[in-house]
Amino acid sequence: MTTASRRDRLSSAALGALLVASAGLHAQHAIYGSKTFWIGVTLVMTLFSVTSSVQLLGGHVTTVFVATGVTLGFFFEMLSLRTGFPFGPYHYTPLFGPCVLGVPLIIPLAWYVIVYLGYVVSNLMIERAPVVSAGPGRALWLSLIGAGVVTAYDLAADPFMVLTVGAWVMHNPGDYFGEQLRGFAGWTLVSFLIGAIVRLSHQKVPIRPPTRITTLAALYPLLAYGIWWLFFSLIAEPRGIRVVAAYAMGIPTLAAVTGLWAWRRAEQASR
């Protein structure tokens, strides 16, 4: 076995272990109602996403992705806490742990994680490949699709976080389970900007996976998004969110499964 093959197997095993840990933490919440698990699951999913990104995109692109997601995520959260733009006026409770300028430290990490998963899911949906290096126009289109995938997650996550978990408090409750509708436009904007910067940077920082991308490596990010889909579809409160999650997150998940299957068949045919 070559060094590259050994490293690839170790990375795949680590990803599998992190995904099992994430699923276990979600199950713990479903069974025991633990609210503090969100800190742990965010840290686990950050490690998962970084490891997965290195496998699919290479170390340099992963560095750009993490830096962009964390920086813009923190900036827009801080901006909204002070001005109400772009998510509406709100404040965080102590549930998510230590804060900087009112923003819990895990929140910028969560922005990176969900936009990374949306990046891979949108690639599979539209391009039928886990990794895509496209021209500016296509990059912006894929970024918009990825932003839709991210916002589909937020349609389920935000009301759940406010009404059930109590992670933050909306100052002016809105029409969507207490959430302001403009908050979803904010999610679309921020996730689009993160995705667009990363995709446009591929021209200067090219995608260079360390080894050939395997079906398992391509599948892992889709499984991670799929765990969230099932979690919110089965146990989210208020119960009306379950219907939203089932369709809003289910459609891109199943479309990405179809894309992954097509990519796998094309890969096998090219050998």
Image (spheres, helix red, strand yellow):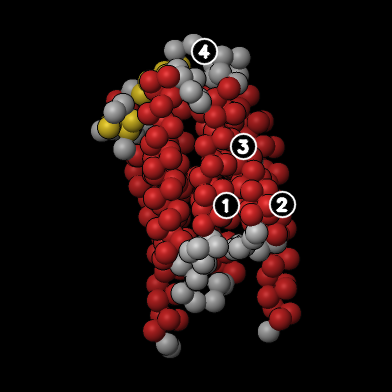
Q: Position of residue 45 (x, y in %)?
A: 42, 50
For the residue marked with disc 4, what is the amino acid?
Pro
Residue denoted by label 1: 119
**CA–CA distance in space, label 3 to label 4:** 20 Å
**CA–CA distance in space, label 4 to label 1:** 30 Å
Position of residue 85 relative to residue 257, above or below, is above
Residue denoted by label 3: 152
Q: Position of residue 269 (x, y in %)?
A: 74, 79
Position of residue 257 relative to residue 236, above or below, is below
Q: Position of residue 172 (x, y in %)?
A: 49, 11
The answer to whether residue 42 shows anywhere in this view is no
**CA–CA distance in space, label 1 to label 3:** 13 Å
Position of residue 23 relative to residue 242, above or below, is below
Nearest to N terminus: mark 1 or mark 3: 1
Disc 2 crowd rating (10 Å Cα; few below 14, some 14-19, many 20+) is: some
Horizontal side, residue 60 vs residue 116: left or right: left
Nearest to N terminus: mark 3 or mark 4: 3
Say which of marks 1 and 3 sits in front: 1
Residue in view at x 71 percent, y 81 percent: 270
Q: Quadrant of residue 167?
A: top left
Question: Which labelled disc corresponds to residue 169?
Answer: none
Q: Quadrant of residue 110?
A: top left
**CA–CA distance in space, label 4 to label 2:** 33 Å
Q: Secondary structure at mark 4?
A: loop
- Tally the marks: 4
Q: Secondary structure at mark 3?
A: helix
Viewer-side residue, 48 vs 107: 107
